[in-house]
Image (cartoon, rainbow, N blue to C red):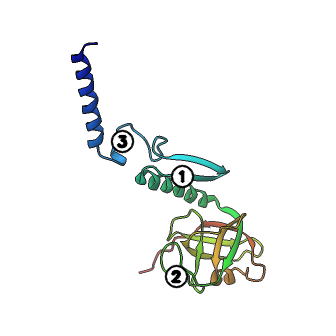
Amino acid sequence: MTQETIKIILALVVILFLLFLLMPTGINRAAAHNCDSICTSHVSIKKHKPNKVVLIKKHKKHKIAAVHKRQKNILEELVEGIFGLASFYSKPQPVASGGRFNPKAMTAAHKTLPFGTKVKVTNKRNGKSVVVTINDRGPYVKGRIIDLSLAAAKKIGMTNSGVVPIRITRAPIRIARL
């Protein structure tokens, strides 16, 4: 190779590098190679346990899209119902959605449902049910899928036993009368 050829190749490399630096970041850069909301080149996914996906972010916008995709899947599962164990908590404390926990409110904690989601929780032992709003994250005890507030736990009659089998479904939509 001659020195002129080396200079031309080096100049092309520098130009390509500068173009890469000037390219917009985030979703636009991802769109350059047609990735969907979970792009394996930007987000690495590790499976630790069945049905539990841990995301390690490289690009903030991709992580948010991936979380929303997981929340969409869990909302679809609510149509059929999610079965598991429920517990309750009653001590005032900060909640993940902001503010403080109110044990007298009809609220609950769930690991993946979006904040503000209204769900119907039915005690499988006695058939009683309550509609709660998700405003916190948890429970962090193996085998449990939802933590109810004290008021919600009283309404479905689970305060004596502490942990009961439940079914979670979408809350019925109520239409206001005019």
Query: Which residue is identified by label 1?
Result: 55
Residue in view at x 52 percent, y 70 percent: 173
Q: Residue furthest bottom?
A: 104
Q: Residue furthest left?
A: 4
Q: Amino acid at mark 2?
A: Arg
In-front residue for pair 148/157: 148
Establish if 174 lies above or below 150.
above
Q: Secondary structure at mark 2?
A: loop
Query: Which residue is identified by label 3?
Result: 31
In-front residue for pair 21/42: 21
Query: Which residue is identified by label 2?
Result: 100
How far from the left and from the top, in percent, is residue 92?
Answer: 59, 84
Establish if 41 lies above or below 151.
above
The mark tally for this picture is 3
Residue in view at x 49 percent, y 41 percent: 40
Q: Which image quarter holds the C terminus?
A: bottom left
How far from the left and from the top, in percent, is residue 132?
Answer: 58, 75
Q: Which image quarter holds the N terminus?
A: top left
Q: Residues within 10 Å of mark 2 (few under 14, many from 20)?
A: few
Q: Report the disc number at residue 32.
A: none
